Each structure stands twice: as structure tokens, then as C-alpha cells.
Amino acid sequence: MAGPLSTAEQLAARFRDVAPPADFCSLRFVDELTEVISVRDGVPEPTQLRRDQGAMITVVSGGGLGYAATSDLTTAGLRRAAERAAAWASRTAAVSVVDFSAVPFESARGEYVTPVEQPWEECPLADKLSLLQQEVAAMGGDDRVVERVASLMRVRAESAYFTADGGMVRQRQELLAPDASVIVHRDGVTQKRTTGGRGLARQGGLEVLQATGFTGCGARLREQALELLAAPQCPTGRMDLVLAPDQMMLQIHESIGHPLELDRILGDERNYAGTSFVTLDMFGRYRYGSPLLNVSFDPTVPGEFASYGFDDDGARATRTLLIEAGRLLRPLGGTVSQHRARATHPAMSGVATTRACSWNRPPIDRMANLNLEPGDLSFDELIAPIERGVYMETNTSWSIDDSRNKFQFGCEYGRLIEDGRLGAVVRNPNYRGISATFWRSLAGVGDRSTFQVLGTPYCGKGEPNQVIRVGHAAPACRFTDVDVFGGAA
Amino acid sequence: MIESRHLEQLAAHAFEGLAPGEDLLLSLQAEDSDFVRFNRGRVRQPGSVAQADLQLRLIEGQRHASIELSLSGVLDTDRRRIDDAMEMLRPIVASAPPDPHLLWATDPVHVHHEAPGAPPDALTIARDVVDLAQGQDLVGILVSGSVASGFMSSRGQRCWDVRHSTMLDWCLVHQGDKAVKSLVANTGWDPAEVAEAMDAARSQLALLQRPPKKLEPGRYRCLLSPSALGEVMELLCWGGFSERGLRTRMSPLTRLRDGSDRLSPRVTVYEDTAHGLGPPFSDKGFIKPPRVGLIEHGTLVGSMVSPRSAQEYGLQTNGAADHESPEALVMEPGTLQDREALQRLGTGLYVSNLWYLNYSDRPAGRITGMTRFATLWVEDGEPVAPTEVMRFDESIFHLLGGGLEALGDSLALLPSTSTYERRSTSSMRLPTALIDGVRFTL
């Protein structure tokens, strides 16, 4: 890998100079350039850039672990960080939750680069603003429209990971997260239709705009928002529910992804993000969902938002099934968590998913690309058996309990399903359920024609807090006997 | 920790290089922080972070753009980073269209506040926490260090603010999701203060060992602790008091603005920068008024107005950040005395903590969320059992309107524990709240 990572090569040399004698020592360098451009109601908003760069040194010594992060990348700055990390390891070794010196940290070598077809830099700012102006213009032309916004967030994320025993991983991700929204109002009713709060996020260049359907989305959003204004509230009752991929993303994230995070299961997050209804003894035997449920950890999907070659502990990332035919196989846990879990469950496996949001936060177990595998039903076949139900698109509200069990989710756009066909539009569609039983009501899984690759930059967790990028790909899915309801106070 | 002199030297360098017609605003957020995670009464992940982010906003007439960059604390390195940043900004500003909503601070105001002393080194106090846990299942985080905010402009403005804080945010866990959550926050470290809080938490654990009561969906009387009310108010701060949110009718308080609904006359809410934990100036350099009235006796009387909204809607800014959320929110106390609160509740729920709130119908002001931790079933004023977690789904116009029976007569300070990107200096001061007929659904 050539180019801007030349800084990383200098860092590697400095790291060799400052790495203290230890059982394990690593340096993780991050250099991210973020650019956000937006148009609101026809007015371009000021361009916002962010250049975030720094390094974290981790030291494992005598059974303890410590880290120190700094943006001072000189030899003196890195030496101070290494000394501080070593002091933490030494001072807490006797009271650590695990003997970190026994953790089998890898010293991998390799690289990952996002394939890009249309580089961001090759399109002038004026042209990109023009693209946004077109979508914003398409959302207007009606006095019921209150606000129109279109925006692009681009990130070039470069990282390097060195270990004192010769490991070296370099990765460069190109990310694009487009977003558009329209708010409409009439006679006391307000509705908002969006592309899902940057839910179209992908890796790649400007080709993402066509691939995700962002190009041309403005007219559809406006039309659907106005339909919602005139629509009745979503009906209340137990009925069949069909979720579009842009709601499946949230459903997978909250009620499969988070409960399967091994650090939650081990208790690390109980003071903040919460615990899990999943326990260590469930892996390999627990029936998580119906036999139609197949869920993969897959950091190899081209263009998916959280694709990468190695996690932030240097572990190589490969496609792995977490749930197969409804049976729970393994958790979302990286090197450290797997080692901890094996103290009581020696057969525990995991995946390469120890990740940090940047150089200034330590890596923890996170989702990456967590996908629900497609089935064999077209959309028409998916809804054909439904006498009375609701189809929902695009998440707008999400809430779930401490153990990731009792949830309530709301969507932007709903349509009745009657006698196997899509019917009238309904507004404020919501549903609630319990994770431990909800996935067992999975009764139909859409095929590739219903499948979408999506993602979000905004998954929060950890102490200190971290917000991280995740990808979710899914087909449309049908669930039976779900508690559905509408809005209003 | 980056010092004010470092920022001054960088500002002098940056301003010296400006061309005629250019103005530059520099906004700094810096911290030196120690973070120690605990689990099972032992140390899970300890470390230190030194970070400093400088935002440069280059303005030429009505054209402008900004870049935020990491500072190293090394003068030569940071001067080079600023030069590189200005090289990136200039062509962007040159090609940007004029911004009709640009409003920036031009008054050469000077503010300087620097807390005395220094925070304790967490290396020396992390073991205290392990010792105080006494082998019990303690999980949480110790955060300690200094936070600096600075602002300098080419028009002569100079603002600088440094604060120290040490915060232990933890749970003592009985089992599963049954836990007592506590927070001790101060400008220093007092083991006796933490030990007292730990003992108080330990005494509450005894009740959590009883078999939990499973509640059926329905309406219940609830006594919300200040922390639980804090979750409700934090959700309302997400767009509720925003001028833009109110104008676009996405605020859950839109009905208050248009007069079609009102809250209880017991509810008076204001932004109290004068007694908050953050700096008195915004990241855009505007000086915040000491107090901004938001709700008075149930009626909306004000909003958080960013410079951008001020320019767009023809208003005065009150120094709100772009997100237009309160950062030092206060709800005036009522008359309910703490020692009488459980008796007034009678039979119902004492809600110690709420969790994961969101809007179930945002423009209508309907919200949902979960109970968490030591939420107790109370009979005739006596806590008798912990409860299984329950979901509520209720209108804010009931929670803080017709259903609100009383507010506590004292306020609890709730410093924000948020550390997303950086340590928050936001806070709230809130009373307990006694609410009748809260709807639980699952």
C-alpha cells in the first residue's frame, strides 16, 4: 500500500524505539478525513471537514493491560504514551479481571483496501452540491413541505496496527453515507420520510449513490411523505408483519447483534449498554429463531459498510455463521473475550470483531457486517399468504431493554396487507415484541431480489463511549402474530 | 494538557497568515482523561487519553467552511497541521456559494476561567475502587482528568475555560439485571464520599434479593427518581427545545408552541448556564446568557436558538450549539418532601432508572422506554420487591401534564456521564416526580 500511509512507516520505526519490554505491545494508528456537505431547502450548508489522527499504544505485562492514546506522534510523544500504558498494566495487574498475559494476541501481517470506482476527489464540490440540489428540488413544489435536506458524509479512514513482535496490518476504507429527508405538515399532522438516517451507508466512492438508490430518491420521499399525511393511523392488533430491509437492519442490530456481543454476556457493559438474555451455555444448542433464520458475520461483502481485513486486535476477519437454521452457534466476541469465556466454556469460539471507533478509544466487541441470509421467496410470494397484516419500511424509533429482550420499534412508512396484496398506506406504524420469541415467528424470508446491503455510522456502546460503523444486509422478512399499533398521544 | 498559551501561539500563527478579507475562528476542545473500566469488582480496561481538537472556521464575506483537526501539543507540528488545514479550506471557501444563514461572533469578548489545582491521577486511585467493592460484583467506570475549552477569533475574541472532574459511575449487581446504580462526581477524589455511596448501594441490594414482582400491562402510579426523570428530560432535549425543531414541527413540544396543549403548571424549566458545569461560551464563540427560560408553569416561553437558526428565523441567538439542546437544564422543585415521597406514592412503582427512551410518535409527544436496575414495587409506602423490567409508552403531556401530581422539594445534580468523542460538560438539576396513571405495555 503506497501513498498517505507513509506516516505509518515512520510510526513503525518510532514504535520499535519506544516499545517497552512486555508480554505484548501494540501500536494502532488512525488517520481519518471526514467531509460533510449538505443542502437544506435549496441552501448549501457550509462544508465541514474533520481530520482526526492519533495513536494508541497497548501494553500487556505481568498479567495486566494498559493503554495510552495520543495525537503527539513524535518519538517523545509515543514514548510517554508507552510509559503510561506500561504503568497502567503494572499498577492493575494484581486486580485485573483476567490474566491478560495469557491472551493469545495475534501478530498478523496483511492489508485491506476498499475498492473504489468513482473517487470522491475527482468530482468537484460544485458538482456534488448540484447532485444534492436535484434531490432537494425534487422534494419541493408543494406548500405542505416544511423542510428538505440532502447530505453526503464521506470518510477516508486509514489505519495501521503494529505489534512489537513484528505484526503489521494496514487498512484503508473509503466510506460514503448519503442521506435525504423531507418533513411535511397539514392540519396538525406532521410526517417525515427519509432514506434512513444515513442508513444507505456503504464503502466505495460516488458509485454508491446509484447503487443504493440515493440518486433520484427525492421525488419518492416527497410522494410518500404526502401519502402519509393523508393516511390513517396504523391499525392496532396482533397480525402478520413484513419488514423491509431498512427495518430489518435495525431489528437484526438490536435483537441479534447486541445480545450476541460476548463482552455484554461477560458483564462488561452492565453499567451502560446493558447485559444480554443470552448466556454462555446457550451457544451450540439454543434455538434463537425459526429454521429459516441464518445470520452471518461477514466482513468480506464488497461495499458493505463495515468490511475489513483485520480487527483492531490484529485478528483476521472471515465470513462466519453465527446462527444456522435457527440454532445459535457462536457469539460476536474477539480475542480477549473468547479467551475469558474459555475459562468456563473451553469450546467457545468467536469472530474477529474487537474494534475501536478511533485512536482514542480501546477496542471492544462490536458488530461489523451482521447479515441475515436471503431465502427463496419473491416479495409477492412473501406477502401472498397474509390475510391481514402490515408492511413497514424505514426505522424511525428504537427502544429495547437492558437484556435486549423487550423491544418496541417504529417505522416511517406502512402499508396494509390484505388478502395477499399490498393495500392502503398507514402512518406511524409501530410494533413490539420480545427477542427471545420474536425470531421464532419468522415465517418467510425474501430472496435476492428483496435483499439490500445497508449500514449505519451510529452504533453506540462502551465505557468510555464509542460510536462505530456497522453494516447490515437483509432481505424482506415475514413474521407472524406480532403486536402492531399506530401513533397519536 | 494543552495550555492557553499553546492556543494563543497557534492563533497568532494562523491569524498572521490570513489574507485581506479573510477571518478565522478557532474553537478548541481538549482533555486529558484517565478511564478505568471495572467488571466483577476488578479492573477490565484501564488507560489514558490525551486529545485536543481544534476547529478552524475560515470566513470570507458570506462564504465559509470549517475543519476540525487533532492537535499534538507540539508547537511546530500543530503549526504545520494548521497550515495544511488552511490549504484545504481556502479552495473550498472560494468555491462555496454565499451562505445566507451565516452568523458569527464578532465582539472581542475576553473570558478566562481556569480551575485551581489538578485532578487526581487515576493510577493512584483505581485500586481504591477495587478495595471499596470488597469483592462484590461492581461494574462501571472511573473517569478523571481535565477538560479545556477555548475560542479565539481574528477579531480579537479570547475565551478560555478549564475544569477538573473525577467521576465514578457504577453498579453493584445482585444478579442478571438487578443492580443498584450510583454516581459520585466531584472536582477531586474523596474515598470517604465514595465509601458512603457504596454502603448506601449495598444496603439497597438486600431488597433486590427478594423474588421480583412481574407486573401486568396497565396504568400504575410512579415515583420517578431524579435520574429517571433525567432520562425523560434528556429525550426531550433531543430536538424538543430546538428552535429549528419547533419551526419544522418535529419537536415533541410543538403542541406547546402552537398552544394546542400545555404541561402541568408545576413544570418550570430553564437553561441555567450560570450554575452549569460547562463553559459560559459556545463553540461558535457566543457568550451564553446566564439563564434562558424554556417552560414557565406549563407554558413554552423560550427555545434554544443557534446562530444559524437566529439568522434564518430573524431571532437573537442564545449561544445554543448547532444541535440546539440545553446543556445545563433545571426543573424547578415542587413541594413534595423526600421523606414523604413513598407515602404519597402509596402503592405503585418507585422507578430508580429508566433506559433507552425514544419517541413512539414524535410530533405528538409520545415516548416509550424501559425501567431498569432497582425499580421497586411499593405497597402502602413500603418497598416490598424488585420488579421485572417493564416498557412504558406514554404521552409527555400526561407525564408532565395531567398525570403529574407533585415534584420533589429538592434538586439533584446530574452531571452527564457521556464520553462520546469527548467528555461532556452538560448537566441537569432535577427533582423527583410523582406521576399517576403511567401506561405500561409490555
Image: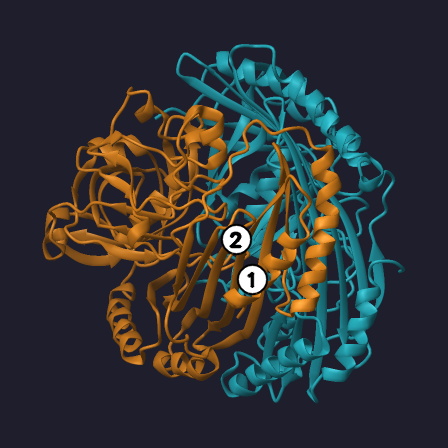
Kindly identify the residue that appears in the image at 42 percent across and 41 percent down: B320
**Left or right: where A433 falls relative to A256:** left
In this image, A201 relative to A225: left or right? right
Of the 4 image quadrants, the one containing the N terminus of chain A is bottom right
Residue A388 visible in the displayed image: yes
Q: Is residue B14 left or right of residue B432?
A: right
Q: Is residue B336 above or below residue B44?
A: above
Q: Amino acid at mark 1?
A: Leu
Q: Earlier in the sequence, mark 2 or mark 1?
A: 1
The furthest residue to the right = A2
Total number of numbered labels? 2
Q: Residue at point 47% right, 47% down?
A: B285
In this image, B234 relative to B423: left or right?
left
Q: Where does residue B114 sit, x and y in percent of width and height?
A: 40, 66
Mark 1 element type: helix
Residue named by callout 2? B152
Can residue B362 be seen here?
no
Q: Residue at x 55, y 73 (%)?
A: B48
User: Mark 1 and mark 2 in contact (Cβ < 8 Å)?
Assistant: yes
Camera-side residue: A81 or B390?
A81
**Chain B is which colour?**
orange
The quadrant holding residue B16 is: bottom right
Q: Secondary structure at mark 2?
A: strand
Nearer the observer, A56 or B69: B69
The circle on residue B7 is 1
Tell me, by letter, which chain the rendering colours cyan. Answer: A
